[in-house]
Image: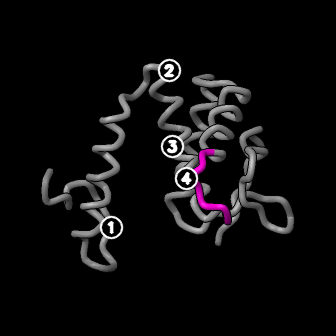
Amino acid sequence: MSACEVSSPLAASPGLPKSAEGDPVFGEPWQAQAFAMTVHLHERGLFSWSEWAETLSGELHKPERAEDGSDYFDGWVAALTTLLAVKGLADPETVLALQESWKRAAEATPHGSPIVLDNDPLR
């Protein structure tokens, strides 16, 4: 796992995995990227801390979420997608299509090579 230094209030997001020192930790690079993207959008004023906390909390308390929190960052991405849609910044279907395209690109990319969308066989 890796840690991240950040002074954003988003570092106090409900349930955010933290190290013994209290720093956010990420099990996969995409989790750190989702966190950084959310911090960036918040700092640009696209949504407030209270909007974020409410949306993330609602997502994390859905009955289908893993009790052990193992899908925390899936909930994080879902909350971000919801906020982007509510704010009229991104269409949920477009976000989902892009997620699927990245997944296909990752599956089609040879081990050790960078994953790029051009590797998506359906693109």
Range of residues picked out in magenta: 62-68
| Of labels 2 and 1, the one closer to you | 2
Question: Counting other residues with Cα less than 10 Å from the Cα at mark 1, is it few (<14), some (14-19), or many (20 or more)?
Answer: few
Residue 87, label in figure? 2
Q: Nearer the viewer, residue 11 or 79?
A: 79
Q: Earlier in the sequence, mark 2 or mark 3?
A: 3
Q: Is residue 63 magenta?
A: yes
Residue 114, label in figure? 1
Q: Tell me the SS state at disc 1.
A: loop
Q: Which residue is mark 3?
A: 78
Contact between labelled residues 1 and 2, with CB atoms less than 8 Å apart: no
Q: Tell me the SS state at disc 2.
A: loop
How far across and how far down the image is residue 119, in percent? 20, 61
| Of labels 1 and 4, the one closer to you | 4
Q: Earlier in the sequence, mark 4 or mark 3?
A: 4
**Which corner quadrant of the image does residue 106 belong to?**
bottom left
